Image: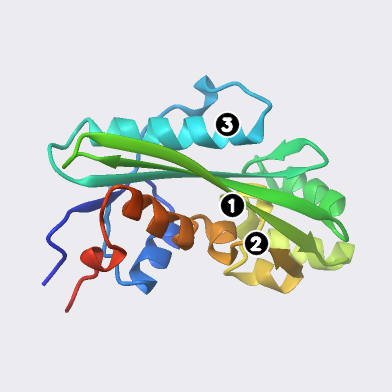
Amino acid sequence: MGSRFRFILASASPARRSLLETVGIQAEVQPSRFDESTIQTTNPVDLVRQLAFEKARLVAQQHASALVLGCDSVMTLEGEIFGKPRDRAEAIARWRQMRGRAGELYTGHALFDLYQNRNAVRTQKTLVEFALTSDRQIEAYVDTREPLDCAGGFALDGKGGLFVEQIQGCHSNVIGLSLPLLRRMLADFSYDVTDFWHSD
């Protein structure tokens, strides 16, 4: 039997869905079709907040009663914003920039509560320190195609985890969704996160 509340994830990310399932939240997945190119800002916090909000808003418009979560992640390295690499060449060039250095991973979280007609947007930041990878390792990793689907060009929960030396801050945020932040956002709307647990 599922939760008495509908929980919709406005994202096609398998990693975000898996994170929710791991903590007992069985989300309905409904990817947003929002055109990300319409948001133009060089501030990473503003960027992820606006993208998360618009993704959640578009999906929320299609429902009468549910909680809808939209997320978006980017990484910055010395002020430069890294989203998903466009192609193999860009992914390799980025990794050559990132190796041996630390970047900041930002994830925007937008939660629309259609039961109470409320919404909130929050941001989580995590510092990611990358290993001093060789050219051979970088090319082999990019050839797996994993980096092409990830903000910053790496997946902490995949092969990319081998090339992350350490993180400072929320671990799940780097995967795409801060579970502690989600718990607090639900609490702000007077929900207990256990209300969303499902039983088989």
**Residue indicated by mark 2:** 169
Residue shown at the point (67%, 29%) measured from the top left = 43
Q: Residue shown at 40%/66% (left/top)?
A: 18
For numbered disc 2, what is the local secondary structure?
loop
Label 3 amino acid? Leu
Q: Tag 1: Cα neighbours inside 10 Å, few (<14), some, or many (≥20)?
A: many
Are the residues at dot 1 and dot 2 in contact (C-beta closer than 8 Å)?
A: no
Residue at the disc numbered 1: 150
Which numbered marker is on residue 109? none
Front residue of this view, candidates 59 and 188: 188
In the rendered view, tell whether residue 166 sits above or below residue 57: below
The residue nearer to you, when weighing 153 against 2, is 2
The C terminus - image quarter? bottom left
Q: Percent position (x, y) of residue 77?
A: 79, 44
Q: Pointer 3: residues within 10 angstroms few (<14), some, or many (20+)? A: many
Disc 2 marks which amino acid? Gly
- Residue 134, quarter of picture: bottom right
Which of the marked residues, 1 or 3, is nearer the chain's N terminus?
3
> Badge 3 is on which residue?
47
Could you classify mark 2 by the number of other residues whose Cα lies within 10 Å: few (under 14), some (14-19), or many (20 or more)? some
Q: Position of residue 98 (x, y in %)?
A: 82, 53
SS class, disc 1: loop
Name the residue: 86% across, 53% down: 96
Amino acid of disc 1: Cys
